[in-house]
Image (tube, helix red, strand yellow):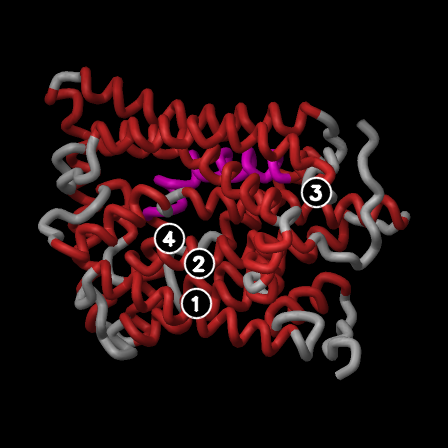
Amino acid sequence: MREPILPPDTRIDVLDRLRGFALLGIFLMNIEYFGRPLQDYVLGIPAGLQGQDAAAAWFVYTFVQGKFWVLFSLLFGMGFAVMADRARDAGRPFLGTYLRRTVLLALFGLLHIALLWDGDILLSYAVTALVLMAFLHVRGHALWLAGAALYLGASALAALSGLVLQLLPPSQLAPIAAQMDEATAQAQIAVEVYAHGSFVAVAQQRLETVFTYMVPSAWPMQIPSILGVFLIGAWLVRSGRMVDVVAHRGFFMRLLMVTLPLAVLGVGASLAVGTQFPAGEDFPRAMLATGLMMLGNLPASLAIVSVFALLAGSGFGARMTAVLAPAGRMALTNYLTQSLVCSLVFYGYGLGQYGEWGRASQVGFVVLVFVLQVLASRWWMARFEFGPLEGLWRAGTHLRAPRWRAAGH
């Protein structure tokens, strides 16, 4: 199949709609960790929740957690392919532009960590984006095959590790138990700092959490997983599927029919293993559940892509999802604004609500803020070509100021 020539400066609208939807899912997932330390990520749903809080926690854990960073990663890979292929079609150099864009993304990530939140994904994306350059000239089915091997390999390794660890005698698990006890102790320190610390103390704690815990413990599995999803996203654009979703309705229908059962199988298996894992006491089972959930997250995200692609070809579906497009066009601004709002509400230097809200209240807050973001994004994009941070990112990437005002303004 011949790769499509992408029209210059023409947006692929379905990508903006998907980005807008991904923002909601990312926010639903992230807000939990403005009231809970990141060291708890693999421990599942907190014990003791009841009523609406238990229902909200189960909903997010089952239908949101892990799915939407995968969806965002698919979209990043699609954006990479669009940028690279448009440069190829226009005969423009790509490497220097891409490296500037990636360095700026890393800077956004570092500032996000230091100033707002330690659960940042931008720095991980920037690091992975450098590795992605090695696949610039890979074409055809090799892209999705390599991507699937990377992601599913990392997921299967996590699940297999959890399974093997459960078969080991307690004496051989002692070093892991000691590491978990240390992580629990560090988490308790982080909770105290986040709940009551000054801005400087919280910033120091965020940096320490990322570079002494997240980078060594999460990146070895996270970076290959992200790279794999990037490659699958790039293939979806280079194969022409995302460029003209209406013409490929049959493909997306088949993709949905395959991925939805796989998502149910993976997530269902994870839920069967368990949803609560006491800190330091049941790490092997937590690892098994995490790996199985990861195996279900990729097909779940591809199912979401398929649904949006199919909706784009129907009048009602297109109108229904179009409301998300302006928010998706300024996804970086909205993503960081979510962290800004939450940092001011939850941390000790703000309103000091860290650990005070139930899960149902968190979900309600997310819906309220996201609706306001959708409305604000619609207002902004009717007047300007780019979101505030998107325009800054573009200016640094291309080394020239963009045209800010939209046509007619």
Q: How far is disc 4 from disc 3 in space, using C-alphas?
A: 42 Å
Q: Amino acid at mark 1?
A: Phe
- When the figure is inspected, residue 243 is found, relative to residue 20, above or below; the finding is above
Looking at the image, which residue is at 83% across and 31% down?
Answer: 2
Give the residues in magenta: 213-233
Real-space CA distance between mark 2 and mark 1, rounded to the nearest whole angstrom: 7 Å
Q: Is residue 365 above or below residue 187?
A: below
Q: Residues within 10 Å of mark 1 (few under 14, many from 20)?
A: many
- In front: mark 2 or mark 4? 2
Q: Residue furthest bottom?
A: 409
Q: Which mark is residue 24?
A: 2
Assess whether residue 218 is covered by the magenta stretch.
yes
Residue shown at the point (53%, 33%) measured from the top left? 256
Q: Which residue is mark 4?
A: 210
Q: CA distance from mark 4 to mark 1?
A: 26 Å
* In this view, 324 is above or below 249: below
- Tell us which disc is closer to us: 2 or 3: 3
Tell me the amino acid under the disc marked 4.
Val
Q: Label 2 vs label 4: CA separation?
A: 24 Å
Q: Which residue is mark 3?
A: 246
Tag 1's secondary structure? helix
Q: Quadrant of residue 100?
A: bottom right
Does the magenta portion include 147?
no
Q: Is residue 77 left or right of residue 47?
A: right
On screen, residue 267 versus residue 126, left or right, reads left
- Residue named by callout 1: 370
Please indicate, yes or no, whether residue 331 appears anywhere in the rendered image.
Answer: no
Q: CA distance from mark 2 to mark 3?
A: 25 Å
Q: Label 4: how many residues lie within 10 Å, few (<14), some (14-19) or many (20+)?
A: many
Q: Amino acid at mark 2?
A: Leu
Q: Is residue 401 left or right of residue 192?
A: right
